């Protein structure tokens, strides 16, 4: 694994526990952790349970004993690492967004396609797909429970940048992160909306806003929000704090999207609602064990959203865990992701989301940026048709 920050912690927890809860054809061994800073990578490797650590990610690529490389670094490093790993015949799991540009994502997708022909698997870490309630929502929509889809509504609301003195992090630096709320959390709701509805976004009209243009220099603070130790100087924020866009899905369905880190009080409110001719499904990650389901065909007097607790053995992933009603947390989505990836590697099948699917998300991100730069004019996500 490369990277030991927030995602490194979440992924290593998942690598350690997936085979203890799911029957998997292979048992992962946490071999080597790579990170830039000697003292930090040494501490993280011991804490996360890795056998070895290195300050050179290339060591992992060159090590014949390593089968899988898990990329948990900022977006600006994904292309180089993924290309090297795939060329060396390693299976790759790469954090989202796939890269910082469509061109980089395209290169990774081409490399993944070539590697696939040699039996090498690759997957992008859109972990929220592995939330039982969302996987169940997808099953319901595919099974016709909401009828014909009429409208899609998605929000990802966080507030860790509401404080104008929250320090800089790499997530606010365009060179490292690619974009701000748009790529970091907007990418999740784009992926989910397309995956649950089974439709791709064809065109968008968007607006991006940087609400707090400078922030205290980072000091040693690395987390989300928090004041950390700062030098007193301020640095330019080069990404968006708020991303709003309207989307036209293939087949004509309209969707609205909002990604923000300025929503005071909303800590991780990733919400999605799909309205159809026969009903609706609605989800909020702050209540991640629940899915709201509305059946418009029920008798008028009994109509209303039903709160389905998605902890029954019938719900995706739930049977591997606790008795009914005991609930899962954020970390379980990563454990499910690793379980699915290890199963795919063991069985010789291609895991999803593939790099191709992640490239489509990247096209949507790029189209929103282009639209925002041109007065919110509608912009196509089709590479053959640059303007809508
Ligand atoms: C920060 O906004 C962040 O950690 C994202 O990078 C993750 O993808 C999301 O799961 C939680 O929020």
Image: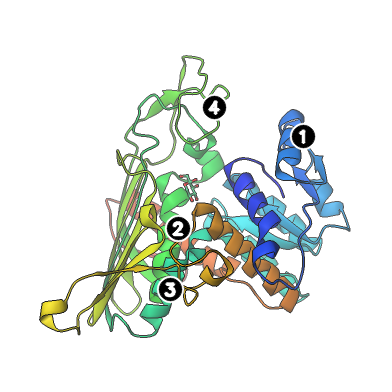
Q: Which circle marks residue 42 in the picture?
A: 1
Residue shown at 35% from the left, 29% from the top:
163
User: 200 left or right of 105?
Assistant: left
- Secondary-structure class at tag 4: loop
Counting the numbered discs, the total is 4
Instruction: Residue 274: name its quadrant.
Output: bottom left
Instruction: Give the spatial CA distance, label 4 vs label 2.
Output: 25 Å
Determine whether label 4 and label 2 are within 8 Å by CB.
no
Residue 136 numbered tag = 3
Q: What is the spatial separation of the Cα atoms under label 1 and label 4, in whole angstroms? A: 19 Å
Of the image marks 1 and 3, the number of the one nearer the N terminus: 1
Q: Which residue is mark 2?
A: 188
The answer to which image quadrant residue 301 occupies is: bottom left
Report the residue that reaches farthest toward the left. Answer: 301
Nearer the camera: disc 1 or disc 3? 3
Residue at which label 4 appears = 221
Residue contact at pointers 1 and 2, CB within 8 angstroms:
no
Which of pointers 1 and 2 lies earlier in the amino acid sequence? Answer: 1
Say few, some or many: other residues with alpha carbon within 10 Å of mark 4 (under 14 / 14 to 19 / 20 or more).
some
- In the picture, the quarter occupied by the C terminus is bottom left
SS for dot 3: helix
Q: Is mark 2 within 8 Å of ligand 1?
A: yes
Q: Work out whether residue 142 or residue 118 is closer to the camera in this orientation and state it.
A: 142
First-in-chain label (4 vs 2)? 2
Mark positioned earlier in the residue sequence (3 or 4): 3
């Amino acid at each position: 694994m490369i990277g030991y920050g927030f995602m490194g912690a979440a992924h290593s927890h998942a690598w350690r526990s997936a085979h203890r809860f799911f029957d998997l054809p292979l048992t992962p061994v946490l071999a080597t952790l790579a990170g830039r800073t000697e003292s930090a990578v040494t501490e993280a490797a011991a804490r996360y349970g890795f056998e070895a650590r290195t300050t050179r990610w290339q060591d992992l690529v060159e090590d014949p004993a390593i089968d899988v490389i898990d990329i948990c670094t900022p977006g600006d490093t994904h292309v180089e690492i993924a290309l090297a790993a795939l060329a060396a015949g390693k299976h790759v799991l790469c954090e989202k967004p796939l890269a910082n540009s469509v061109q980089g994502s395209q290169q990774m997708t081409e490399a993944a396609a070539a590697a696939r022909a040699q039996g090498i698997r690759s997957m992008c870490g859109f972990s929220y797909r592995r939330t039982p309630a969302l996987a169940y929502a997808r099953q319901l929509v595919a099974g016709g429970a909401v009828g014909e889809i009429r409208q899609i509504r998605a929000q990802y609301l966080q507030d860790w940048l509401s404080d104008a003195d929250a320090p800089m992090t790499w997530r606010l630096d365009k060179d490292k992160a690619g974009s701000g709320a748009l790529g970091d959390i907007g990418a999740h709701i784009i992926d989910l909306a397309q995956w649950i509805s089974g439709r791709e976004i064809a065109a968008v009209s968007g607006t991006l806003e940087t609400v707090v243009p400078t922030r205290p220099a980072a000091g040693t603070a690395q987390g989300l929000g928090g004041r950390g130790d700062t030098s007193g100087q301020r640095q330019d924020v080069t990404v968006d704090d708020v991303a709003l866009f309207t989307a036209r899905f293939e087949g004509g369905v309209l969707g609205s999207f909002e990604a923000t880190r300025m929503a005071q009080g909303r800590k991780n409110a990733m919400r999605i609602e799909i309205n159809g001719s026969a009903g609706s499904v609605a989800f909020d990650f702050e209540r991640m064990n629940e899915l709201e389901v509305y059946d418009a065909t029920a008798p008028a007097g009994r109509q209303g959203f039903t709160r389905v607790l998605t902890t029954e053995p019938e719900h995706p992933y739930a049977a591997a865990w606790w008795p009914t009603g005991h609930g899962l947390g954020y970390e379980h989505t990563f454990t499910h992701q690793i379980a699915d990836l290890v199963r795919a590697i063991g069985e010789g099948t291609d895991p999803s989301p593939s790099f191709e699917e992640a490239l489509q998300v990247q096209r949507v991100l790029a189209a929103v940026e282009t639209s925002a730069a041109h007065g919110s004019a509608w912009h196509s996500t089709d590479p053959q048709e640059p303007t809508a």
